[in-house]
Each structure stands twice: as C-alpha cells, then as structure tokens.
Amino acid sequence: MLGPIILSNIDPRKIVLSLTPIYLLMTFPSMASKSGKVNGKERIAIVDSQPSSRIGLSHFIKKIGRWEIAWSSATANEAMEKICNDQPDLMILEIQLIGKDGLEFIKTLMPLYPTLKIIVHSAHSEDFYAERCLKAGAMGYLHKMEPMGHFEKAVEKVLRGELYINPRIAKQALQAAVCQSESLKGDDHNLHNLTDRELEIMILMAEGQSCNDSAEKLKISPRTVQVHRNNIRLKIGLESSLQLHAYAVHFYGRDTSIA
C-alpha cells in the first residue's frame, strides 16, 4: 500500500499549491515570551475541540518519548492566549474548532509566528481542505483515519522542516508544477533576475537539499533560506513552492525529494 509522500527539500511553509510563502516575508516579531526545547526535546501543542483527541494524542506523544507536550487547548482563542506566553515548536491542529475555525487560525498565526510549524490532523476530507491548509501555512495534512505510525512520521518530518502530505495530493500538485515548468522553459530569462545567492539556493533545491540543509551549507539561517526561496518564486512567476521545486529540478538537477 502506497504510504505518505515526504517532500524533504520543500520549504517548510511553502509548498504544494502555495503554502504560505507570503507570510514568510513578514517581519512581525514573535509574540511568544517563552519558547524552546525542554531537555533537548521539541515541544508540541495540541489544538482540538474533542477532548478524546487531545487526550489520545497527548498519550501517544508521551509514550513515544521523543517530544514534550507544551500545552493543549479546545479553541483557537484559548490557543492564542497560550502561544503568546509559550510558543511550541509544532502545533497539531484540527480545523473544525469551536468559534474561529482552524483554517482561519492558521492564517492568523503565520504572520505572528512565521517559524511555527503546523500539522493539520483532521477528520475532514483532504481533497477539499489539504490544499487550503497548505496555502494558509500548514506544513502537513494528516487525516485522523491514518495509522498512528503515519502521525509519528509526519511529526518527525515536519519538525525537521519537511513537508508531509498524502501521495495522491502530492502527485496532483507535482503534475501541475511540471506542466507549468515546461511552459516556463522558454522563459528562462527570468533566471537572470536572480541574485547569485538565489541561484545557489535554487540549485541546492534541485539537488534535494532541505531548507535546514541549505542553511547549514550556506552558513545562514533557515528563515533566510525561506525568504530567498520565496523571492525566487516571485521573480520567476510561480504560484507555489512546489512548482518552484519542479522548476528548479527541471533546469538544474534530478528530483530527490520524494521517498
């Protein structure tokens, strides 16, 4: 059975069908007064209106022992109050919440917390919601019917700065990206508008380097890599970071991001 697809070199927040590139250019400082790892472990917050889901996920994460639970909340408003004082590394979010829905909450969070990673864990169809959540800024979408082993893999990959999505959704996006990259092939004069550093980052993308890998290689921050990638996308005229990846592969290398 075909498992979820991991896109390792796609920018955390900017992928399939235009994750949230624009938000990565925002310079709003994080409002969190406290964040960071506990005992060297990344911290995860859970936002879900269903108590059984919050309890179940908390128990599973604690059982794994690789991450810490930062906090949990039942509503977006409650979560916003908590994140102002305690920013986690990752948020597990259900889009159907009481009051403000999860999709709108993602859009609210991204400008304020551009480094926050979000996985949407929902019972709603990914055919309709996955694209919207990724465009808003989430880094992954996982249906609640997926095995918990997939949940663990999703958390692991997203915390490493990689995208986690259903293979069917990824295939559809890649096909669209490749088609657009083909149509842009004769328009490579846009590449001349890129700076030397932007070209360097684009080549690293084609080689399969993740955002964090590129940052380490170039001795810059992952956020700086993210900003460069978004600038490249805008200069070339692509709609999403996934299309940018396909475009980079088309010109410079081979696709090594899907495993």
Image (cartoon, rainbow, N blue to C red):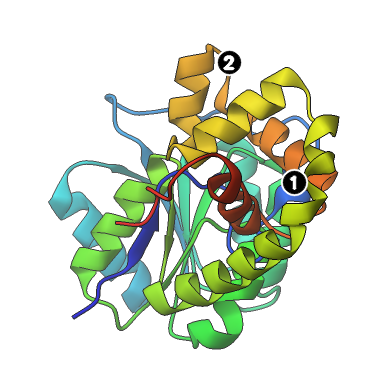
What's the mark number on residue 22?
A: none
Residue 189, located in which quarter of the rendered image? top right
In terms of secondary structure, where does tag 1 sit? helix
| Left or right of residue 148, residue 69 in this image | right
Q: Residue at 19% across / 65% down in the picture? A: 149
- Horizontal and vertical percent position of residue 158: 41, 49
Q: Looking at the image, is 82 positioned above or below residue 137?
A: above
Residue type indicated by callout 1: Arg
- Horizontal and vertical percent position of residue 16: 58, 63
Please state which of the two labelled residues, at mark 1 or mark 2, is closer to the viewer.
1
Residue 201, located in which quarter of the rendered image? top right
- Horizontal and vertical percent position of residue 138: 57, 58
Bin the neighbour count of mark 2 within 10 Å (Cα to Cα): few under 14, some 14-19, many 20 and up.
Answer: few
Q: Label 1, on which residue? A: 233
Residue type indicated by callout 2: Ile
* Cα distance between the residues tagged 1 and 2: 19 Å
Q: Label 2, on which residue? A: 220
Question: Is residue 221 visible in the rendered structure shown here?
Answer: yes
Q: Residue at 69% across / 77% down in the picture? A: 99
